[in-house]
Every structure is written in structure tokens, then in C-alpha cells.
Amino acid sequence: MDAIENFDHELRELVNDSAPRLFAVVQIYGKEEDGRIAAWGMALDDHAEIVDVEGRVRMNVRSPERGVRRFAHPPHISARLMWVREQPAD
């Protein structure tokens, strides 16, 4: 491996090791009668960023779980955190 390839490999490892975890916030209507993705988010080491699917609401919260609560509207709409499946590294 030459110097450029080695540097690229080190950067790729840095990116893969530091990547945030992606998640969806899903809303469930009634007693699991229907559901939808309400927002997407990414969990970083010390906080989470969440954006609703309409692009109108952006949140910076301490944890994904705290953000999910804001999408629940009891008693008819509950919200759930769902982690995106991790993709294999290149």
C-alpha cells in the first residue's frame, strides 16, 4: 500500500469508527392499527439530532429517547424509536 492508499484507509477507519447511529421515529395510531415514519435522526456520542419528515421540525436532544417522546400524542398516537440496520463496512 502506498502512502495515499494508507492515508485513505486510516481516514475510512476513522469515519467508520466515529459514524453516528441512524434511527427513525415512528408514530403508531390506535392499537397498532397503522403507523408511519414521523422523523429521522442520528445519535452522536453526547446528543441526537432529529428532523421530521416534512422538514419543519429540527431537534437537538440529549438522547434519541427524549426526542421520540415529543412525537407521541396520547391516547391515540404513540411513538417508538427504531434503529436503522447497520450496513457492512466497505
Image (tube, rainbow, N blue to C red):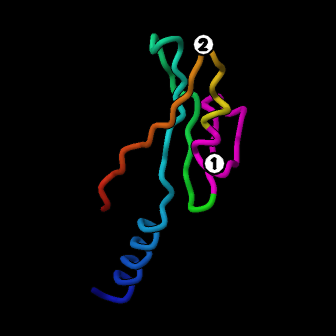
Report x, y in % for residue 66: 64, 42
Q: Amino acid at mark 2?
A: His
Magenta region, residue range: 47-67
Residue 49 image label: 1
Residue sitting at x 57%, y 28%: 38
Q: Secondary structure at mark 2?
A: loop
In this figure, what is the number of numbered marks?
Answer: 2
* Residue holding disc 2: 76
- In the rendered structure, are the residues bearing label 1 and label 2 in contact, judged by CB atoms less than 8 Å apart? no
Q: Quadrant of the C terminus?
A: bottom left
Residue lying at the far front in this picture: please name it.
75
Q: Earlier in the sequence, mark 1 or mark 2?
A: 1
Q: Is residue 74 magenta?
A: no
Q: Is residue 47 above or below residue 56?
A: below
Q: Nearer the viewer, residue 63 or 89?
A: 63
Residue sitting at x 42%, y 43%: 84
State left or right for residue 35 relative to residue 6: right
Q: Amino acid at mark 1?
A: Glu
Residue sitting at x 44%, y 75%: 11
Report x, y in % for residue 71: 64, 28
